[in-house]
């Protein structure tokens, strides 16, 4: 199995939409609707974050989005790691995270931060199992509660 990241481009946004819409529970937590429109998906095309597909061999299985350095706190932030619903539960999330973590380590970074929607118990369990430690609560722009975690990687 070869897992790697591939840059998201305008012409591949429909694949991002398919991945996102295979996770209706997450979409409800995040924005109150089960499905995301293509216009909403365009947020993955910006200059502030790195957005990539998670691929296994030639198959698109998920999406990852992150910042190398958040200007507010100067830490790297993992904004999203989500797998298509058909590929969850097979260990791909762990492998994708390890690839991301190794990339951050190669850049000389010492820790990673994430924000997890408080309703997303599955994601909380996943990231805590990877060694993330809770440090503060916050609120998203749409008013959802966010639990902030940090992991030492050096």
Image (cartoon, rainbow, N blue to C red):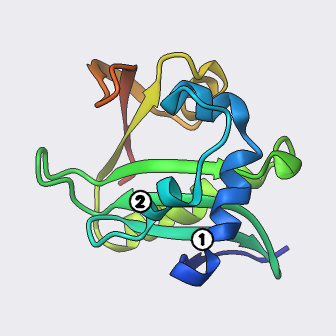
Look at 80% across and 49% down and name the residue there.
91
**Precedes in sequence: disc 2 or disc 1:** 1
Residue 88 is labelled as none
106 vs 90, left or right, is left
Assign the C terminus to one quadrant of the image: bottom left
Look at 34% across and 64% down and name the residue there.
49
- Label 1 secondary element: helix
Look at 85% across and 52% down and name the residue there.
87
Q: Quadrant of residue 56?
A: bottom right
Look at 51% across and 62% down and name the residue there.
100
Residue 68 visible in the displayed image = yes
* Residue 133 percent across, percent down from the top left: 41, 26
* 79 relative to 105, above or below: above
Q: Nearer the viewer, residue 129 or 48?
A: 48
* 12 relative to 128, above or below: below
Q: Nearer the viewer, residue 98 or 70?
A: 70
Q: Quadrant of residue 108?
A: bottom left
Gap in Å between the C-alphas at discs 2 and 1?
10 Å
How crowded pointer 2 is (Cα within 10 Å; few <14, some 14-19, many 20+) is rated as few
How crowded pointer 1 is (Cα within 10 Å; few <14, some 14-19, many 20+) is rated as some
Residue 9 visible in the displayed image = no
Residue tagged 1:
13
* Residue 51 percent across, percent down from the top left: 47, 67
Q: Are the residues at dot 2 and dot 1 in contact (C-beta closer than 8 Å)? A: no
Assign the N terminus to one quadrant of the image: bottom right
* Residue 9 percent across, percent down from the top left: 53, 81
* Residue 12 percent across, percent down from the top left: 63, 78
58 vs 150, left or right, is right
Residue tagged 2:
43
Q: Nearer the viewer, residue 76 or 58?
A: 58
- Label 2 secondary element: helix
43 vs 8, left or right, is left
């Amino acid at each position: 199995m070869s897992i790697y990241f591939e840059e998201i481009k305008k012409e591949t946004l429909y694949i991002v939409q398919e991945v996102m819409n295979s996770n209706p529970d997450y979409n409800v937590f995040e924005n109150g609707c089960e499905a995301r429109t293509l216009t909403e998906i365009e947020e993955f095309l910006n200059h502030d974050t790195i957005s990539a597909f998670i691929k296994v061999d030639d198959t698109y299985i998920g999406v990852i989005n992150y910042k190398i350095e958040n200007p507010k706190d100067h830490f790297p932030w993992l904004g999203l790691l989500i797998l298509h619903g058909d590929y969850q539960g097979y260990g791909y999330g762990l492998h994708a995270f390890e690839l991301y973590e190794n990339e951050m380590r190669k850049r000389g970074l010492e820790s990673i931060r994430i924000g997890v929607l408080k309703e997303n118990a599955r994601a909380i369990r996943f990231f805590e199992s990877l060694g993330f430690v809770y440090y503060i609560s916050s609120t998203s722009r749409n008013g959802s509660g966010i639990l902030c975690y940090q992991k030492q990687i050096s």
